[in-house]
Amino acid sequence: MFNSFACRSVARSIFLLGPFSNQMLNIAVALCLFGQLLVIYQPFFQSIFQTEALALQDLLYLVCLTSTVLWVDEIRKYLKGSRMLA
């Protein structure tokens, strides 16, 4: 999901674009997150997908780990923009 926000623009930061300015993307991300949580925590889907419930600490760790794609891309955009201004 973080990659979808990072890829909204090649050169402009998500914070300049506004993270909530694309309503369809936000709906798609919300539905994907809902589906993922359903698979992780709903017993019916746990049996189908053979998943186990994750602790809050595990979820926070995964969010930090997977968000690096967004932060690295934001740093790349910042550095590329800084070089163009110099």
Image (spheres, helix red, strand yellow):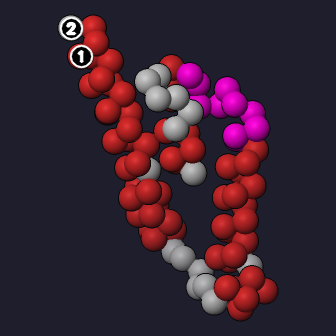
Q: Calculate the distance from the C-alpha at mark 1 to the C-alpha at mark 2.
A: 5 Å
Name the quadrant containing residue 26. Answer: top right
Left or right: 31 as drawn, with respect to 61: right
Residue bearing mark 1: 83
40 versus 52 height, above or below: above
Residue bearing mark 2: 86
Spot occupied by residue 68 in the image (x, y as percentages of width and height):
38, 49
Magenta-tinted stretch: 17-26
Residue found at the very far left of the displayed protein: 86
* Amino acid at dot 2: Ala
75 versus 54 height, above or below: above
Q: Residues within 10 Å of mark 1 (few under 14, many from 20)?
A: few
Q: Label 1: state its secondary structure.
A: helix
Spot occupied by residue 55 in the image (x, y as percentages of width and height):
51, 74
Spot occupied by residue 30 in the image (x, y as percentages of width and height):
71, 50
Q: Disc 1, disc 2: CB below 8 Å?
A: yes
Name the quadrant containing residue 23. Answer: top right
Q: Label 2: state its secondary structure.
A: loop
Left or right: 39 as drawn, with respect to 67: right
